[in-house]
Image (tube, rainbow, N blue to C red):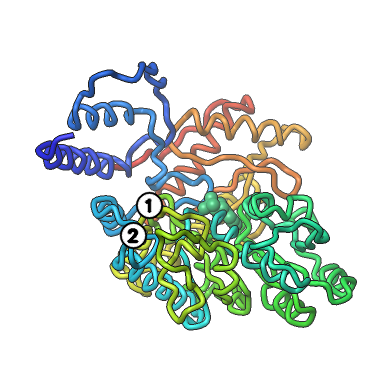
Amino acid sequence: MRRDEIEPVLRAALEASLEVQRGLDAARVSAEAEAPALVPLPESGVGAARAMAELVRRAEGRAVASAGPRYFHYVVGGVTGATLAADWFASALDQVASSATGSPLAVDLEEAATRWLAELFGLDPGAWTGVCTTGATTASLVGLGAARQWWGERLGVDVGEDGLAGLPRPAVLTGGFVHASVIKSLSMLGIGRASCERLSLDNRGTLDLDGLERRLASMGGQPAIVVATAGEVNSGRFDPLAAVADLCERHGAWLHVDAAFGIFARVAPEVADLAEGIERADSIAADAHKWLNVPYDSGFALVKQRALMAKTFRLVAAYLPPSTADGPRPRVPANLGPESSRRARALPIFAALLSEGRAGIRAMVEGHLRLADRLRELVSGAPDLELVDDTRLNVVPFRFVPPGVRRRDLDELNQRLGERILEDGRVFAGTTRYRSVVCLRPAIANWRTRAEDVELLVDVVRELGAGLAGGGAAPTSRSPRP
Ligand SMILES: Cc1ncc(COP(=O)(O)O)c(C=O)c1O
């Protein structure tokens, strides 16, 4: 390693990054190239410049344009200029963001960014402790970790100290919208995947609210953890949060809300009603790398009882700052979440909120809602497409239903269509199983996405679908525009 390598390699990285960003609007979305052969670890290094050049070479055709406007899979935002620059700067500063001793800057900005997020979502910033995480999965780990501590204390046990041995199986009650990441968190916390009881009314996964009430009443005062979803991954649907909060209050249950992307409904008045009641939760998990368009990976948890976070995640060692997370300002984020060593993830969040402001975020979210409306309109108007659900947010489940194909063959056809779309590479949209059928579930969350990208998605689906169904390729009038 040589000091004089730094400037040229950073300039090369800037140039390569600019090249990527300039090409994103027109880029093929999925990877197409073969992976280069794996070579043995070199004995002598090639130096920073050649290592960077090798990375650029390897990225060609192998990187997915997930930061681009036609990546509709999962729920993924793109990086903005402000968030990408802030992420680089965070790496250049290379802060130990575990405590204010390690980095006063990182902790100042984590407190500021999570406070601003609370303000953005109309939550009382004084009522919540925020912590940055790698994503909504780890944010749920934080919220459910605090819930587990609360649950143990209700049974007279400090689970952080003594574990779960000897305790009954915790009851975790959800609807059918529950995301896989919540189940994973339950496993990581030792609560167990099988502790999750899904109370669902239909093939959408609609929460059985009466069933939830009956189940809570049946617990005879024993504590329960309720997990509600704000933004189901296939449809963007919400559990009725206010009604769930009423039940939790009445029965003394913990309410955790997985709001990975749905919390952004709070910034757009036309859909804010969907997320009404989230302010009454005990813990919330959400992502910044989804609708805030912060680079991967970035999530955050908001929890009302900070002391419970600290009892679960406390990190104690003689060489570390004292872990008095119960003090007025904890300033030791490593005591509030799973990571001990942590990067300054708050910097890009802070930059996103400062650069766009409330109005900018609202305009982006509302723009995506318009694009989702446009997609619904195009699907509804096409004779060979069918909306699988009538939804209001930014996820639009639909499938290809050409005339002449038997209904029972549609799942297989749509499965193959999903594979063809990824091979084709003009747009990126995967399949899921929702309402008992295989369908596409494009999500619109990237600031770059325009109406023509959504229109191209529909064209590509119809063209490739027609090819698979044997009807010949319907010509597309639209192709990606640089
Ligand atoms: C509703 C919901 N919860 C949780 C997650 C998991 O988020 P992450 O991958 O950031 O951990 C997702 C991801 O799509 C999601 O849609």
Above or below: residue 289 compared with residue 152? above
Say which of 288 and 416 sits in front.
Answer: 288
Above or below: residue 224 compared with residue 28? below
Say which of 398 and 63 sits in front.
Answer: 63
Q: Is 172 positioned to the left or the right of 457 in the image?
A: right
Q: Which residue is mark 2?
A: 348
Above or below: residue 125 compared with residue 428? below
Quarter of the figure with the N terminus:
top left
Circles 2 and 1 in contact, beta carbons < 8 Å: yes
Q: Classify mark 2: helix, strand or loop.
A: helix
Identify the residue shown where x is 74% and y is 76%.
248
Identify the residue shown where x is 64% and y is 33%.
415
Q: Kindly report the distance in space between the C-alpha atoms of the residues bearing marks 2 and 1.
A: 8 Å
Q: Which dot marks residue 86?
A: none
Which badge, 2 or 1, comes first in the chain's sequence?
A: 1
Q: Which residue is mark 1?
A: 295
Quarter of the figure with the C terminus:
top left
Q: Please, what is the three-letter code of the amino acid marked with disc 1?
A: Pro
Can you see residue 199?
A: no
Q: Please, what is the three-letter code of the amino acid marked with disc 2?
A: Pro
Q: Classify mark 1: helix, strand or loop.
A: loop
Q: Is 199 positioned to the left or the right of 362 in the image?
A: right
